Image (tube, coloured by chain):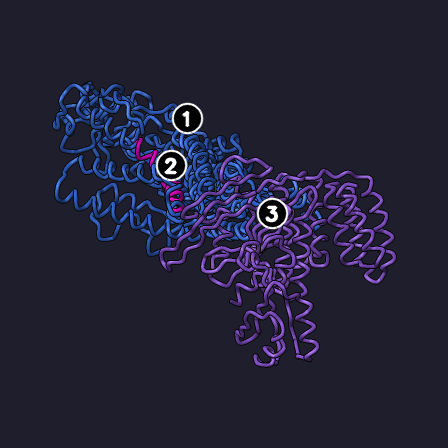
Amino acid sequence: MNNFINKTNQYLLERYPIIWNTKIVWLLLIAAVIHFLFFVMGYLTLSNPQSLQDYNVSEIFFENGGILISFILSILLIVFWLIMMFKNNAFKSFYPTTVLGLMKQFGAYLIIIFASISFYYSYQAGLKIYIDTTYNDERFEQDIETINRASLFFTHNIYDYKLNSKSYPVAFQDYFCETDRMLIQENQPYLKSTFDSYYQFYSLKTVKRNEYVEEYIDSLYDSSLFIENLEDGYKNYYFKDKVVDVSDHIVTAQPSYHHFSDVFFQKGRPSYYKYEHDYSYDKTKIRLSDLEIRLATQNNQLLENNNPAEIKKLLQDFLTIARSYRIKHNLNTDLWFNLVYHPTNFEVKNLIKSRETDQYYDRIYNENEELSPLQEYAERINTSYYINTEHLKRTLTNIEDIKNDDMVHDSIHVVFWISFCIALVIFSFRLTGLKSVLFTIITAGVLSIIVGLVSVLVLVNMLSGSSEEFFVMYFIFFLGTAILLGTIFYMPQMNKMVASIFLNLTTAVILPYILLVIAIISAHQDDYCEVKYPRYEERNDQCFILIESLGIYWSPVFIGIAIIALWFLSKAALKWKSLPEG
Amino acid sequence: MSLFQARIKEVQSFLSNKDIVLGYRKLMDCAMDTQDMAIYNQMIHLTDWKENHPEDVDGLVEKAQSIIENLKRISVQENSSQDAVIEATEITKTYNNNGFKLGPVSLSIKKGNVYGLVGENGNGKTTLLRILAKELEPSSGSMTYRLDNQVKGDFKLRTQLVYIPQRTATWYGSLKDNLKFVLSSYGVPADENETRVLMMIARLGLWNYKHLKWSELSSGYKMRFELARTLLRQPELLLLDEPLANLDVNAQQVILEDLKSICNSINNPIALILSSQQLYEVEKVSDKVIFLKNGQYTDNSDSEVAVNHQLIIEIDTTATREELLAVFKPMDLEKLIYNGGVFMVYFKPTVAFYSVMTALGSHQVPVTYLRNISNSTRRFFIS
């Protein structure tokens, strides 16, 4: 092994001095091993399905100590690397170096640091591959289907089984169910349960308005049932129209499995909303989805068939799935079947808890609370049986989240730019030495204090409004310009130490400086737009703002800018190094 | 006969007289001049053999002879450039904080020559060296560099000017790797790298030290490794600040001889400037000695003494001034100065050095040290 390392080192040393000096081959090898270990850790993390029952398992890396191990390993790896690399410095010893050579060195630093601080992604890849293989798409789909169908009999909440939850047949989605006793028109058809619940169904009418053009009206907003956002600034306001007689479709006004319309888990969308009085801005919440319609139809069919074997099969299938996900429950098929199967109107006669509770928290409502008749009924029919469907829902959500994790999301850009900044500091240190870097930090601190003080003094005494923003931006802009011009044109006239501070400052500020220029241009564009398009929505559609137009391309654009900037910096570094002292 | 052939003959003569140490070093110089990797490898193997068989002189001579035969078949390109590598004109350097001023100094430094830069501490030796290496900006004056290896830009020029400060930086990692890194950075082909490094290690007598760590080396060997690193860069100009500091007398002589010999390379002559306090040793190897006092420049070729051809003798003796005056009375004595340690005796040009020795001998004066310093910068130190 030692022989192999020595031979490789000698091979690299004789042919590729930069690769040998930066130790990139070894560092990447070590990093690859650590990445693999993190991958394995990620792969094994969720091997117990119970670990999927927590919130946000896709971010488990930040909770189970993974981040800490990763951080420590990153630090150790980078320190080890620096110790190895700092043994030699061709630039400091005046060995021949070119601009391209310096850029290659920087590139090596960047790659090494990126590889050393990105173990998170390997861990996530492990998680994802485990989930993708263990819960393949086909199995996951089937499980969701069975769970959704069986969720009809979860019977956790009596409100889910009230008449106003009904969404089958499909026509019900075009109706609004009024449940407020005071708003029921008694001269029109309505229904009443034995628990003093009233239901009156209304058809809907809409008012369409364009809020870019028309004035916003408070009362319209307040009196509407729902508001639907359409394109180009249009909105649909929904109002009650006429009472509809739905009695032909109603079996009973009592809480019944016939009324259940909830979807336990729907991929790509949170499944906890209710229709009732939902002042929604989301069009999809007003119209039922295909899945909702299909499930409502299937549920209705199941109850219509009234076939105990079919129902038992469904319950059994669910319990098998629950076992595979290690979901806690205290039911068996027959027991559950007996709790829910009441063929006369399929009324709800027993409630099942959604999690295990002890005797002190056995009630649904607080003891001191004044209960409605329905709530009293719910308390009465509450049993000590439970299925932990909360855990089940979290499990499904977690599996879906991890499956949908696209790995290379925005955070990878953040990790890249953190690596870039660390690489720049090391680059500066290698080129100009510790003393220069320390003096640069002090100078940067002093400059920041000056910027802060001048800004505060000027702003307090002279300016107001948006001029503040511009003053600070232009002040920093002129300061940055002075540093850049000093480095470009006046370095040969400077003391070598001062020149090194200018060089290091330029290295540090060049990208923020370009960002600042873009920000200034964008701020001017924004100001211009504000005058031209006074309406906010219109402004959003019509205006070109440079910084916004970069959008998701900001990172590649800045990588391009950084490469050009590095070329100039490397050139300046060679020039600086050859300066005599004093 | 070419210069190279003459040198080979000289090596043969040393070896046949069993003057092994010097002969072997000269042989290595000849081998290095060939720039031929096959010869380098032969020398490397011989060095390895020599270190393993230190007592077998005859064996060594025999093996060296076979290399000499190979050398004879090689023609070496002579670099006979007589142009100055640096032409410094009226350079001065003023330090505002202590009022010290160096110069004006005008110098012309040629390849193949060794320049000794002497003077007491704080007289501007390091400053002058650093100015010549472009490490310091002169306050006035100009410098022209005429290197064979034409370079564009100041950074590239500075890669060619090698200045070794008195305190060399610590090396980290393997010593050999550090040397190989120099060559690969200078673009030496990979297949020559190891050979050239081992050859340099052999030449500078570092064969048995190449596996040590920097911290395990004595200061003399540190200086040798630093020299090896420097010479691998094949500099045309080499500026050494106090290379003899911390070395014992033997080591000083060996390193100076080595430097002289390496700078005299046939195809890669080097202009060497070295500063030192070791006047006697430096004068022995230097083609020209530059003396700095209070920043002012004198060299051993231009002084009133040289013009007057005065005889100046330095004597370390237990005899008193009066006794010495009595001894030298019949001779053309000009003055006798005692500086507390030694006597400086000035005679008219008509007096010969041997007659002074005769006079001292015949009067049985106890002399521990006697030296003719008429042409030495030593006289500037004393006066």
Mark 1 or mark 3: which is in front?
3
Q: Position of residue A414 (x, y in %)?
A: 41, 39
The residue beneath circle 1 is: A298
Three-letter code for the amino acid on which mark 1 is drawn: Gln
Q: Say how many tags the image has.
A: 3
* Element carrying mark 3: strand
Mark 3 or mark 2: which is in front?
3
Q: Is residue B29 visible?
A: yes
* Marks 1 and 2 on same chain: yes
Query: Could you say which disc has been placed on residue A526 in the image?
Result: none
CA distance separating discs 1 and 3: 99 Å
CA distance separating discs 1 and 2: 75 Å
CA distance separating discs 3 and 2: 35 Å
Subunit bearing disc 1: A
Residue at screen point 55% across, 69% down: B334
The residue beneath circle 3 is: B271
Chain ID, blue in image: A
Q: Residues within 10 Å of mark 2 (few under 14, many from 20)?
A: some
The residue beneath circle 2 is: A488
Q: Position of residue B83 (x, y in %)?
A: 59, 40
Nearer to the camera, A537 or B337 = B337
Q: Position of residue B243 (x, y in %)?
A: 59, 58
Whether residue A37 sits left or right of residue B96 in the image: it is right
Residue at screen point 35% across, 41% down: A156
Instruction: Give the magenta range.
Output: A500-518
Residue A509 highlighted magenta (yes or no): yes
Q: Residues within 10 Å of mark 3 (few under 14, many from 20)?
A: many
